[in-house]
Image (spheres, coloured by chain):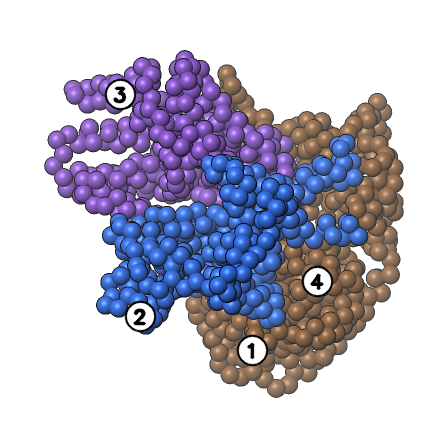
Chain colours: A purple, B brown, C blue
């Protein structure tokens, strides 16, 4: 018998609080962190327009946001993708080279958007069907992509194509004199699509299920093989897209782009509350993680520090976050053991 | 189709692995509207039969028929689509998803390609209501206790409108109330037309709930029986034969009372740890077997871990052989001559990827420290001695422990500690989930050890076992020790003590 | 006989190494020749050994960490920091060429390296943080710290005593390789002649069961991270000494990846447990030979990474039982009965939470 509950409103609030303390706690903490940090940075310097500073964050980091979305899919299944930085570079090099060779822009773009997912698909197949650890396979993928970059060209290749210049340079005015660029719009679309897929489709829920307990997901009859392979293709697609965004941002292709980018992406995800063990986390959390990292960069630039301070501060922030997550996890375990 | 047409039928099915025939020409019939128990020791082939049925394993020969149709499943999904649902012993759901998702994922209601969350919640609420489970479909599964998770797993099976429901050891983590609840659900499902295949080691429960049973031994079919027509003795005989005498021997040995002399090996006064264990007094003397009895969650394992130093006590003192000590870690306890086997054999007991030899010498070697390795000859002698003494099969010291049956794994764990020559042996559920033969061997071993002077703390959920083996029993409930009784306490009295006050 | 041979996990890396060497010999017949000059041995093989010495060393440390079910991503940063500290000390001292200065410099570098290893050990073993994240922190911040030490510049030093480690010779062989091989021998004896190997493997397979069996879990975990960092520290000194400079940006770049690859190619599983030091040495040699092969065979150096990728995948596939089965039976497998894994608690991959009793201590 379903017992008659107390008036709905009271239950809803208590339930809401309980749910917040559960899986939403981490991303909300990240959000608070970002707000505090951003406010701090804005308060410290006399920026002409704080809102534009925020919008600039989005503009400068739109490619990283797209990367973080792809990485989130992979990490949610309990895997990891170390190849994304190299795929970004490969994408910039491919698009620059093909444009220089005279290919029409749409074809160049399409090529890039095929190569990325293809590499991801290959990696996913090896991981799933031959049971090789994702760390190793994607590491090999990183070498392969980076190697292909060098083979194609070691020089910086400028991009002069009008379509891409438009994408990269055009100001999109939101209100007053506040602007963003097309790259932000593309990143936003990617985020929205990702959120929809992860929460409203069976595919997305299977991603979470695999991360939670892969054997169980299989025994529940879910198509885990297909999903597990797909997330690497998705990550590859996002990396390719991020490469395009970076290419239009810098208007060049360079094989040394994106070295270490995969680690930044992973750091963003961790700060955003995505657990590396899989099954827990949200795309929006990763996005917030990217914004946090971007704020650090803004601070370092504004304070005129040497660029290596970005790394040190990112490391410290990561440490702080990880420790806090750990303490929270311990407390919740203690509570669970109480019953 | 007559009423006697089997819902599921296996004919002459064989399943082989490299070197071993897990099922050898087995016939099996499951009739509609019945609860059918599958019985047998570990290694008898019960799990294999289920996995062959649900498409997890390939079969090398024989036919599998569902509703009279020859079928061959290529995976769990097809089996589910054909109406066969399985609930495994370890709840195979995803704890990070919500209850509703766990129930309906894979066949969730969808609208225009995306999940209709509201319909999903509604449908799961309906299913949960049928099970009398008052939980929020939107809550995360992991926030609920195992017993609830198991019922959610059954709700998932019901969502598929299963023709056949297979329950593999569903009661091992449930207490008496929860078992009664589960049985109620099973009976209702049966009456509504589902055939239920039920695997369990608890003979009493099998007799309570099943209509018919099938007994397997060593991969072969022994027979198919009506429960009402088969006595317990006949059942056990069918399952294993000779070990019956072993069980009787144990009864005789334990009934001899022992005089306790000298100070107790362990004297715990007011030992406790908030919030799970309230201050408890416990004495264990040389040659004494003290049983800890109580429901799941009563604090038995927690108390054992406190004594062993695996958790830190927040209150109380411990005297070991009369001297006051604080045990901060298992190492400290081991140095005092304590030994402990965890109830979670796989997670906290065996080192699966290592050999039997490595597992056997581990505790001894750890105590000696890494700088003093055991000489090869000494190691080999010790290993051979204990393999023989405890009848561990196979007698191969290089075999990987993960490939041994549950009973043999438990014996390896026991041997690991016996090699260290402990003064106090703490056994947490040493006979859970293992076959009757090994169970009898372990019980006899405990009694023999106590007769030779070892102090033993014995934890078990099977009250019959506890009363048979223990000299004294500490009864726990909700983290309190509510009584300490002698070995003359009957199972009924014990049950009453445990249940007393619980609604 | 063939079956038993192929059953040994060292077979595949050994074969790969032989194959690579064979390719080299075919392309450059004089590849295997070693000549004696000024009392030192020279030749392509010697080059491989000397250039591979730092990676070998780091990989040795990494083997033990991975065996404990952990991973150490920070070794590259430690390499950079060690080199930076040593060179900064020497460059800033009154007597850069004096042996005393060099020894102090190395002492400082190694001391700090050990401290960083200890730090990793604290995060993993006391706070219970997943090793991949714990060491990611130092990996991210570490290079920044190294750059901080060098002030963003490349510090060059002129100090003959310092040079010996990376570029010097002893007994005819490069000092660097002698150091690495000595460490290999030392660790080999330590893990196999004492019970350390057993205890370490036990922790890697099942940390909680090992703790309950009385294994000194914390001490051993601390030890492996300190050892890994020390190896990285010595490697950092080798690298800095070899170029007589500290380049905080590039020193040890990607060495953690090479080290992990060497360990995996050598047959140790990323999931922890049984490990093989010999396999790791083979793996490191394969990686170094690859680089040398590309160079001596006249293949454009840009393609090195592509070859590396292919070799890594090839060896890993050969080690994967499913791949071998696929190659062996052309028709779909009928012999293996398992299609879907057993319903059992999931084994989480490399990023593990060390389950150091959640409920006790601290």
Q: Residues within 10 Å of mark 2 (few under 14, many from 20)?
A: some
Question: Horizontal placement of A13 versus A307: left or right?
Answer: right
Question: Horizontal placement of B350 versus C132: left or right?
Answer: right
Q: Which numbered marker is on residue B336?
A: 1
Q: Which residue is rendered at x = 45% and y = 23% of the image? A: A112
The chain letter under disc 3 is A
Q: Looking at this view, is A8 or C357 the one in front?
A: C357
Disc 1/disc 2 C-alpha distance (Å)? 55 Å
Disc 1/disc 4 C-alpha distance (Å)? 25 Å
Q: Are marks 4 and 2 in contact (CB under 8 Å)?
A: no
Disc 4/disc 2 C-alpha distance (Å)? 56 Å
Q: Looking at this view, is A278 or C41 the one in front?
A: C41
The chain letter under disc 2 is C
Mark 4 or 2, closer to the camera: 2
Q: Residues within 10 Å of mark 4 (few under 14, many from 20)?
A: many
> Could you tell which of marks 1 and 4 lies nearer the N-terminus?
1
Question: Horizontal placement of C234 versus B412: left or right?
Answer: left
Q: Which residue is rendered at x = 29% and y = 63% of the image? A: C90
Q: x, y (%) of residue C21?
A: 61, 47
**Residue B455 appears in the rendering:** no
Q: Which numbered marker is on residue B418?
A: none
């Amino acid at each position: 018998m379903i017992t008659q509950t107390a008036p709905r409103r009271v239950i809803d609030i208590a339930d809401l609080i309980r749910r917040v303390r559960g899986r939403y706690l981490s991303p909300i903490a990240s959000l608070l962190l970002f707000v505090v940090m951003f406010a701090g940075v804005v308060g410290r310097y006399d920026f002409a327009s704080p809102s534009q500073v925020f919008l600039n964050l989005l503009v400068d980091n739109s490619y990283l946001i797209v990367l973080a979305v792809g990485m989130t899919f992979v990490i949610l299944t309990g895997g990891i993708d170390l190849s994304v930085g190299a795929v970004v570079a490969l994408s910039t090099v491919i698009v620059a080279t093909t444009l220089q060779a005279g290919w029409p822009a749409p074809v160049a773009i399409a090529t890039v958007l095929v190569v990325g997912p293809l590499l991801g698909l290959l990696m996913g197949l090896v991981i799933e069907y031959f049971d090789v650890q994702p760390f190793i396979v994607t590491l090999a993928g990183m070498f392969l992509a980076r190697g292909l970059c060098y083979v194609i060209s070691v020089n910086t290749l400028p991009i002069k194509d009008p379509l891409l210049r438009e994408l990269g340079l055009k100001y999109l005015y939101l209100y007053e004199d506040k602007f963003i660029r097309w790259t932000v719009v593309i990143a936003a679309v990617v985020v929205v699509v990702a959120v929809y897929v992860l929460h409203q489709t069976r595919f997305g829920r299977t991603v979470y299920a695999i991360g939670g307990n892969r054997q169980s997901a299989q025994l529940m009859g879910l198509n885990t093989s297909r999903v597990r392979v797909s997330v690497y293709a998705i990550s590859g697609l996002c990396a390719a897209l991020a490469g395009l965004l970076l290419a239009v941002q810098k208007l060049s292709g360079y094989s040394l782009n994106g070295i270490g980018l995969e680690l930044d992406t992973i750091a963003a995800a961790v700060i955003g509350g995505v657990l590396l063990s899989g099954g827990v986390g949200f795309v929006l959390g990763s996005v917030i993680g990217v914004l946090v990292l971007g704020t650090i960069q803004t601070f370092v630039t504004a304070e005129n520090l040497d660029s290596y301070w970005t790394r040190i501060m990112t490391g410290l922030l990561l440490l702080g976050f990880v420790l806090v997550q750990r303490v929270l996890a311990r407390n919740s375990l203690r509570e669970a053991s109480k019953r | 189709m007559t009423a006697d047409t089997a819902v599921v039928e296996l004919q002459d099915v064989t399943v082989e692995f490299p070197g071993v025939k897990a099922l050898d020409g087995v016939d099996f019939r499951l009739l509609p509207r019945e609860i059918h128990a599958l019985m047998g020791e570990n290694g008898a082939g019960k799990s294999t039969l289920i996995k062959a049925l649900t498409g997890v394993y390939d079969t090398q020969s024989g036919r599998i028929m569902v509703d009279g149709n020859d079928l061959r499943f290529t995976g769990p999904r097809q089996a589910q689509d054909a109406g066969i649902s399985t609930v495994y012993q370890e709840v195979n759901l995803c704890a990070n998803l919500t209850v509703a998702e766990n129930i309906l994922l894979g066949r969730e209601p969808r609208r225009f390609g995306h999940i209709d969350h509201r319909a999903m919640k509604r449908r799961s609420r309906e299913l949960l209501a049928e099970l009398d489970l008052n939980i929020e479909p939107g809550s995360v599964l992991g926030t609920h206790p195992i017993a609830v998770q198991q019922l959610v797993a059954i709700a998932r099976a019901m969502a598929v409108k299963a023709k056949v429901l297979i329950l593999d050891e569903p009661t091992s983590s449930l207490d008496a109330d929860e078992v009664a609840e589960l049985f109620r659900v099973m009976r209702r499902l049966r009456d509504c037309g589902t055939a239920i295949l039920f695997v369990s080691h608890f003979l009493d429960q099998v007799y309570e709930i099943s209509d018919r049973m099938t007994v397997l031994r060593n991969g072969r079919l022994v027979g198919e029986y009506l429960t009402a027509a088969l006595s317990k003795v006949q059942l056990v005989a069918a399952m294993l034969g000779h070990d019956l005498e072993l069980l009787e021997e144990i009864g005789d040995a334990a009934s001899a009372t022992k005089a306790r002399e000298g100070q107790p090996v362990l004297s715990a006064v007011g030992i406790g740890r908030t919030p799970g264990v309230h201050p408890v007094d416990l004495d264990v003397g040389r040659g004494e077997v003290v049983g800890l009895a109580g429901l799941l969650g009563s604090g038995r394992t927690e108390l054992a871990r406190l004594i062993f130093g695996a958790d830190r006590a927040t209150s109380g003192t411990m005297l070991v052989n009369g001297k006051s000590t604080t045990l901060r870690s298992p190492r400290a306890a081991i140095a005092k001559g304590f030994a402990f086997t965890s109830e979670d054999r796989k997670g906290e007991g065996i080192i699966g990827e290592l050999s039997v030899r490595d597992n056997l010498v581990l505790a001894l070697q750890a105590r000696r420290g890494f700088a003093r390795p055991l000489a090869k000859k000494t190691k080999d002698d010790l290993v051979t001695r204990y393999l023989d003494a405890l009848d561990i099969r196979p007698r191969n010291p290089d075999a990987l422990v993960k490939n041994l049956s549950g009973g043999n794994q438990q014996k390896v764990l026991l041997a690991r500690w016996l090699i260290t020559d402990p003064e106090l042996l703490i056994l947490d559920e040493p006979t859970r989930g293992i076959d009757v033969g090994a169970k009898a061997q372990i019980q006899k071993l405990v009694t023999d050890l106590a007769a030779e002077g070892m102090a033993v703390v014995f934890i078990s959920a099977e009250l019959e076992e506890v009363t048979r083996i223990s000299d004294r029993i500490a009864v726990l409930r909700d983290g309190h020790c509510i009584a300490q009784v002698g070995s003359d306490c009957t199972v009924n009295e014990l049950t009453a003590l445990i249940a007393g006050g619980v609604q | 006989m063939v079956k038993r041979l192929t059953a040994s996990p060292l077979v595949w890396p050994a074969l790969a190494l032989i194959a690579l060497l064979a390719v080299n010999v075919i392309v450059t017949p004089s590849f295997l020749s070693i000549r004696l000059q000024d009392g030192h041995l020279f030749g392509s093989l010697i080059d491989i050994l000397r250039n591979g010495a730092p990676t070998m060393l780091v990989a040795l440390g990494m083997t033990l960490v991975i065996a404990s079910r952990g991973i150490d991503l920070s070794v590259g940063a430690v390499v950079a920091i060690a080199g930076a500290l040593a060179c900064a000390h020497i460059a800033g001292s009154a007597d850069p060429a004096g042996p005393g200065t060099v020894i102090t410099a190395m002492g400082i570098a190694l001391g700090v390296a050990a401290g960083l290893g200890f730090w990793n050990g604290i995060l993993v073993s006391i706070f219970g943080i997943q090793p991949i994240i714990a060491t990611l922190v130092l990996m991210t911040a570490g290079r920044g710290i190294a750059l901080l030490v060098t002030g963003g510049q490349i510090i060059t030093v002129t100090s003959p005593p310092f040079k010996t480690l990376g570029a010097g010779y002893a007994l005819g062989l490069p000092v660097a390789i002698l150091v690495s091989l000595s460490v290999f021998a030392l660790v080999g004896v330590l893990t196999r002649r004492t019970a350390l190997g057993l205890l370490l493997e036990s922790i890697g397979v099942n940390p909680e069961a090992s703790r309950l069996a009385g294994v000194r879990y914390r001490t051993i975990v601390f030890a492996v991270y300190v050892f890994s960092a020390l190896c990285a520290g010595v490697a950092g000194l080798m690298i800095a000494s070899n170029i007589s400079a500290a380049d905080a940006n590039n020193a040890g770049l990607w060495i953690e990846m090479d080290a992990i690859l060497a360990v995996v190619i050598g047959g140790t599983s990323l999931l922890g447990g049984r490990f093989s030091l010999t396999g790791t040495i083979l793996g490191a040699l394969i990686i170094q030979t690859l680089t040398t092969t590309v160079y001596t065979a006249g293949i454009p150096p840009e393609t090195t990474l592509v070859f590396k990728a292919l070799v890594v995948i090839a060896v890993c596939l050969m080690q994967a039982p499913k791949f071998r089965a696929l190659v062996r039976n052309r028709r779909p497998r009928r012999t293996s009965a398992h299609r879907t894994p057993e319903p059992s608690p999931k084994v989480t991959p490399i990023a593990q939470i060390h389950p150091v009793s959640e409920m006790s201590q601290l």
